[in-house]
Image (tube, grey):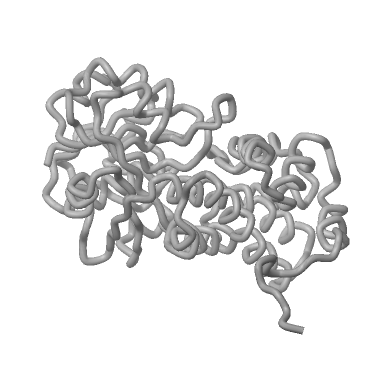
Amino acid sequence: MKICVLGAGSWGIALTKLLSGLDHELTVWSIDSEEIAMLNEYCEHKTKLPGVILNGAVTFTTDLEAALSGKDMIVMAVPSPFVRDTAKKASPYIQEGTIIVSVSKGIEEATLMTLTDIIEEEIPQAKVACLSGPSHAEEVGRGIPTTVVVGARERSIAETIQDAFMSDYFRVYISPDMIGIELGGALKNVIALAAGMADGLGCGDNTKAALITRGIVEIKKLGVKMGGHPETFSGLSGIGDLIVTCASQHSRNRKAGYLIGQGMTYQQAMDEVHMVVEGVYSAKAALALAKKYEVSMPIVEIVNKILFEDYPAKDAVKDLLTRDRTKEVIDLLWTK
């Protein structure tokens, strides 16, 4: 297939490495001319994904029209805050029925829309799908075994993407539950910030396990209210992605949370990480969705207070532990 990857960050480059090794014809676009010059010279992103050398046949360009012309599939890999603007600029060059795979994770703060909703609004002539799961770019770029899930409204579109991405180290499952997949991918970044904060405060494995376990409960409650399938949140884009993002050394959200736990502001932490920290951008949207759908999300609430209300991270753990007593599973009843 002729495939264009929009976005030359670490994830875009890792997927380019994967797809170019499967005999697809790859074009990578970035708005950053210095980034494209570096990729053209070295076939390597020396700052965001060093050591991952791309096929010399890959084309790198800043020309959006040239990048999109005649493509069978487009991989939307720009950070979530830039998805709408990129989609709007790309729309005139995209043909009817072109498949677009959204591989970023986030919720738009102003509209509370998922990224595929945004792309469908800006590029209505395309067939839009999403790809998510526990898949750090640093490992995919090195060929480390990884599994993900693709969500699409039509089975044939999901299967086309599955066929395009499947390799001996990258296994792809398919699902019709786009909303569940996207919410799992976006909201886990907020929980990962909390896990990082706990690490920065010197808390232990017990604390992280509690945040992961109760975090997926919060994500699932909201996701089901919004139309997601309960089993999706027990899968790759739910608990799978949450575990890896809360625990991995590669997780930018966990790292930013760690720095905040150590006393930095969220802006200082993002500057230190040198990459977009999706959880910071999704936190307000997550809280707004919780209020809209009347779902209790105490971890999301406390993360927002720490990020945007100068609330001391050291007080957060006590606040979470001393909330009103409740049952773990609300629907379970005693017989006596």
- Along the viewing direction, whichever of 99 and 268 lies nearer the viewer: 99
Q: Quadrant of the C terminus?
A: bottom right
Q: In this view, does 248 lie to the left or right of 204?
A: left
Q: Is residue 32 left or right of residue 320?
A: left
Residue 108, position in %: x, y? Answer: 53, 31
Q: Residue at x 79, y 41 (%)?
A: 305
Q: In this view, does 2 lie above or below 159?
A: above
Res. 101 in view: yes
Q: In which quarter of the image is residue 141?
A: bottom left
Q: Residue at x 35, y 42 (%)?
A: 12
Q: In which quarter of the image is the N terminus?
A: top left
Q: Residue at x 28, y 59 (%)?
A: 172
Residue 279, position in %: x, y? Answer: 59, 43
Residue 13, position in %: x, y? Answer: 33, 44
Residue 261, position in %: x, y? Answer: 76, 52
Q: Residue at x 58, y 63 (%)?
A: 247
- Along the viewing direction, whichever of 88 and 314 lies nearer the viewer: 88
